[in-house]
Image (cartoon, rainbow, N blue to C red):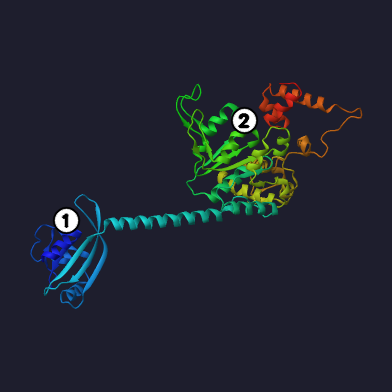
Amino acid sequence: MADPLDRLLEHKGFGAIFFDGRLQVIEANPAAQQLLSLPPSPPPHTLITDILPELVGIEAELQRIVAKQESVYHLDYVNRSDKQGQTRYLNLLLLAYTEKDRALLVLEDATHTALALQAANQQRYDMYLYRTSIEHRRSQIGRSILGQSPAIQQILQTVQRLSHVPSATVLLMGETGTGKNLTARMIHESSMTADAPFVEINCAALPEQLIEAELFGYEKGAFTHAISAKPGLLEEAHGGTLFLDEIGELPLNMQAKLLSTIESKTFRRLGSTILRKADARIIAATNRDLKTEIAAKTFREDLFYRLNVVSITLPPLRQLGEDIATIAQHFVELLNIQLNKKVKGFSRGARKALLAHHWPGNVRELNNCIERAMIFINGDEIDLHDLVLMTPAAVPPSLNEHPWTVPSTGIELEEVERSLILSALEQADKNKSKAARLLGLTRHTLRYRMEKHGLE
């Protein structure tokens, strides 16, 4: 091997193998021996195709290179495992050599470049999967909420728009049982990746003393029983969605902290001075009239306007017309699978009754009604007698047109309100949360009215 060429190959770290017109290996430098795990002296009559099987099939082209009829041939990213079991990638370049009946094979270690290329391709593939996953999830939006009524279509259009804005705060309003939880999940799934967390907290289900610790987390020693640090639900929702159900039940002091967190996108754990980033979409839901709560000073007006960036009011089931039958049929199909039955649908009388019913419990009541019928039915069609529907007399007074009448002698409204509060407290064994539910109020509104009547 010529000295200048030898020094050049050594400087670049290239391997070099000389072979003749019969494709027999003449010489291999140390770099080639290392890259291909070759012995210092190849056995006699070793062919270049024995060392590199990738060259099998192009022997005629190799011979033309040796004969100077062709000048170059290259093959990139040939993989080999070294003695440590690591995969290496080699670029091969075959050149006509100045000496007669001889050609040169140059080997370049391209492992670093190949791995970088693989990583880039994998990243592009991951992005493709991400985009197609998001588009697929967006295309499934219409399958979660059923119906063709204008009200349902308006909700689906809003959710579709929100799927392209994964940071917008959303306020869901509507009666109990209208599907606010389902809508929140739809918004989340249509705009987030499959692994993005969806964290739900029911503000009415936790005592006031625990809500702050659950939402923001705490450090060790922050209070008596804080024996170790614990991240809050806001941290668990990082990169995803935090769903605050029954937001109207949130205490006023927590409303102020939530408002600060939404505006600054930061928060602190209890007992900590470290400011943490709040990177989660906020979806809030309520069955209360928040404007009434604002007037009663039990809900912050500034928090209402901060949550009300995009609002969706879910209609009660009684306003959906023919969609009631569509949703009922959907429940039948689901329960056929669960109960191993083959019920086809509803008789004309049953369908008419479903459409005429007031449905004070909305979709939740409809689901229970269909499930009850499916459990006991023996035929393949649900008839009118299979349905157990709340009679008009059993409808709560608040749903009637004139639930109360004023006697001709008149009443003292303040005294009536005070008496109702005392009655509810007595029935609830002085449990304010239960009494508030009996009166159709939030706990905070009840406390406000108790203070007004001197009952605290």
Extreme bottom residue here? 69
- Residue annotated with mark 2: 253
Residue 446 in the image, given as x and y percentages of width and height: 71, 28
The reply, left or right, for residue 404 in relation to residue 188 is right
In the rendered view, tell whether residue 57 sits above or below residue 119.
below
Q: Secondary structure at mark 2?
A: helix
Q: Nearer the viewer, residue 388 or 296?
A: 296
Q: Is residue 415 left or right of residue 366?
A: right
Quadrant location of residue 408?
A: top right
Residue flagged by tag 2: what amino acid is it?
Asn
In depth, the one of 362 and 59 nearer the eye is 59
Q: Amino acid at mark 1?
A: Gln
Q: Position of residue 407 (x, y in %)?
A: 89, 29
Query: Image quadrant of residue 388?
Result: top right
The mark nearer the N terminus, 2 or 1, is 1
Q: Quadrant of the N terminus?
A: bottom left
Would you place residue 88 above or below residue 49 in this image? above
356 shown above or below 290: below
Secondary structure category for the residue under label 1? helix
**Above or below 409: residue 145:** below
Residue in view at x 49 percent, y 22 percent: 225
Q: Which mark is residue 34?
A: 1
Left or right of residue 262: residue 314: right
Position in image of residue 178 (x %, y %): 66, 43
- In three-dimensional space, the C-alpha distance between marks 2 and 1, rounded to whole angstroms, equals 71 Å
Please state which of residues 382 and 325 is positioned toward the viewer in this rendering.
325
Task: Tell me if residue 370 can be seen.
Answer: no
The answer to whether marks 2 and 1 mark residues whose Cβ atoms lie closer than 8 Å is no
Q: Residue at x 69, y 51 (%)?
A: 151
Mark whose residue sits in front, 2 or 1:
2
Q: Residue at x 68, y 29 (%)?
A: 444
The answer to whether residue 397 is seen in the rendering is yes
